[in-house]
Amino acid sequence: MNDELLKRITVEPGKMTGKPCLRGLRMPVATVLGMMAAGRTREEMLADFPFLEPADFDACLAYAAWRLQEYEQPLDPQAAA
């Protein structure tokens, strides 16, 4: 995982209800990923949101991949059976 990319993702409890955002901005990772999933190009998003930087898109994808590697571990091993 590229740690430099993940440094672009910030979580502040008092900002955007603690959602992961880009570089301390009020731009949630989920919003960027949602636009990408809807077919928006990076160029369109850069034009619409001039405060975004090209590396922000890679950071969002890296963050999503990292988060999806996590899984829930039940406290009671019998509960998983």
Image (cartoon, grey):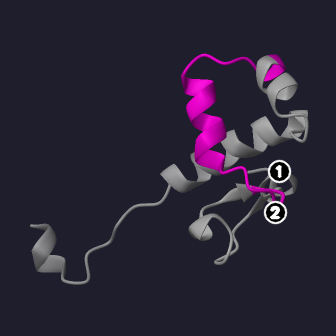
Q: Quadrant of the C terminus?
A: bottom left
- Secondary structure of the residue carrying tag 2 is loop
**Which marked residue is nearer to the observer: mark 2 or mark 1?**
2
Circle 1: is it few (<14), some (14-19), or many (20+) Cα within 10 Å? some
Q: Where in the figure is residue 78, as x and y percent of width and height?
A: 10, 78
In this picture, is 54 found above or below 63?
above
Which quadrant of the view contains residue 7? bottom right
Q: Specify the segment rendered in magenta.
A: 22-43
Q: Nearer the viewer, residue 73 or 20?
A: 20
Classify 74 as above or below 46.
Answer: below
Numbered disc total:
2
Work out which residue is located at the far front of the displayed protein and give it: 48
Please state which of residues 39 and 59 is positioned toward the viewer in this rendering. Answer: 39
Q: Position of residue 36 (x, y in %)?
A: 63, 26
- Which residue is at a point 32% across and 72% down the rendered structure image? 73
Q: Nearer the viewer, residue 66 or 77?
A: 66
Question: Residue 24, which numbered label?
Answer: 2
Q: As displayed, is residue 66 above or below residue 14? A: above
- Residue 1, given in percent of the width and then of the height, sits at 73, 51
Amino acid identity at mark 1: Leu
Which dot marks residue 5?
1
| Position of residue 16 measured from the top left corner of the image (x, y, whole percent) | 63, 64
The residue at 73%/17% (across/down) is 41
**Looking at the image, is 15 positioned above or below residue 22?**
below
Residue 39 included in the magenta stretch of the image = yes
Mark 2 or mark 1: name the one nearer the start of the chain: 1
> Alpha-carbon distance for marks 2 and 1?
14 Å
Question: Callout 1: helix, strand or loop?
Answer: helix
Camera-nearest residue between 70 and 53: 53
Mark 2 residue crowding within 10 angstroms, few (<14) / some (14–19) / many (20+): some
Q: Quadrant of residue 4?
A: bottom right
Image side of residue 31 versus residue 6, left or right: left
